[in-house]
Every structure is written in C-alpha cells, then in structure tokens.
Image (cartoon, grey):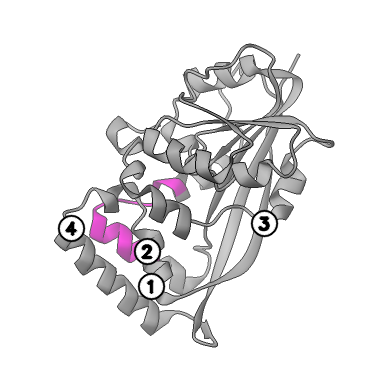
Amino acid sequence: MTDQPGLAVSFGAAAQDYDRYRMGPPAQALDWLLPAGRPDVLDLGAGTGLLTRQLADRAGRVVAVEPDARMREVLAGNCPGADVLDGTGEHIPLPAAHVDAVTVSAAWHWMDPAAALPEIARVLRPGGTFGILYTRRDRRVPWLDALDGYVHDEMGTDDRIGDLITRMNSGPWLPVGAPFTEPRTRTVTWTAEATTEEVAAMFATYSRFIALPADRRRELTARIEAKVRATAEFRDGRVRLPMACYLWRARRAG
C-alpha cells in the first residue's frame, strides 16, 4: 500500500505511453490463473487494459475497475466489450457474489490489503479465483538488474515492487482470517524484443518518473538509452529483453 495516494493516479498523465510501452502478461500466465470455461472476470486496477483485452478473449463477461479517468478513457477504447467502471480495490462498485475471478495486474502495491481483501471476497462467488500478476523485466539478469538499479537510484527510490514480490514468494502473506485459501505461486519467463528507445520509454511510465520536471525526464531518458546501448544484448539491432510474470492464485473460501 502506498502512503502517497497521488502517485497511484499519476499514470493518467502518460496514459497513451503507458499503454504503448508497458508489457502485459503472456498467454500461459492466464492459462494457469483463470478458472476453466468462460468465467465472469473483474480486472481490478485495470489501468489502460493491458490485461483486460486478453481477458476479453477468454471470459464470458469482463468488468474493468480503474480509479483514474484518463486511464479509463484509454481502457474503454481498447476494450469496447468490457464494462469500465470508476472504483478502487477498497471500494468495488459491484454487488456481492458477482464474478468468478478477480485479477489485479501491477496494481496490488497501491491497495490496502486490510480493506481490499474483504471487498474482493465480497464480489467473488464461493470458490472463485483471486489472482495477482506482476509483469516486469527479469532482474535476475545482471545487465537488467544494473539498469533497473540505476534508474531507481536516479529517481531516489528503491525497488519496492521487487521487495514485495520477494516477500510474497517467501512464505504466507495473507492476513490471518482472510477468506481465501493459501495462495499458490508461479513465475513465467520469456524474452521480448524492443528498441533502445522503447526500453527507455518503458521506464518513463513509472509514477516517480512522470513526477519529475520535464528537463530532468529528458536527461534521464538519454542516460537510460546510453546505458542500454552499452550493456544490453541485441539481436538484429533490437534489445533482447528478458521478462518475468510473477503470479499468485487463491480461491474464495466458503
């Protein structure tokens, strides 16, 4: 959970770039995460719909909840078949027992688990699936770890999402009494390809990056591009970008 709520809705200032340069999860992640058949799914903290548009191909019905109006505008354009609603993890605008699955992609760290978990349980049907996904560059690769560390140092931040992933993979993390089975976990890896400029633009969609002054953003972008050119692995002029999707899946108890 963030103690700076304004950052959670800062992405709308770069909504088009967020949608263009962020990477969604691979298909095999959803194969593992979603219930069989064509479930009704809520995509919570849906952003611009990087996951929602994939869910739309698999679900009977998709509801996307997102608090930032600028992100919702892009989301609605990307996913005309989804019901796009204003809301948060702590206040979900749906009736009880409404969906078979709830997904949270790259947004769990913005939510307050003490308030969000009861809300997620409320809108899930008994036995329904709760899934969390984080799709990111694979920092187990040395040059990517160095690049990510450099960007976080320049922004004056640490890798709190990486720390969260480590904690959630190292043992039980659901609060005592949460109405869910103990989460199972899986990691899916693959190698994407991107231009040097696209890699730098991906970093520019970070909330802390968006908050920097314009001249500082331009300077840091140029530095990131230089580091990518100097350290990355290339094939046919494109960066080979190792990626990882970290997954957790639990069932609604009762």
Classed neighbour count for the residue bearing mark 1: other residues with Cα under 10 Å, few (<14), some (14–19), many (≥20): some
The three-letter amino acid code for the residue at tag 3 is: Val
Total residue callouts: 4
Image coordinates for residue 137, horizontal then vertical, percent: 50, 61
| Residue tagged 2 | 201
Say which residue appears at 31% left-offset and 30% top-offset: 5
For the C terminus, which image quadrant?
top right
Image coordinates for residue 242, horizontal then vertical, percent: 56, 68
| Residue tagged 3 | 188
Image coordinates for residue 99, horizontal then vertical, percent: 70, 23
| Residue tagged 4 | 214
Which element is circle 2 on?
helix
N-terminal label among 4 and 1? 1
The three-letter amino acid code for the residue at tag 4 is: Ala
Q: Is residue 143 left or right of residue 127?
A: left
N-terminal label among 4 and 2? 2
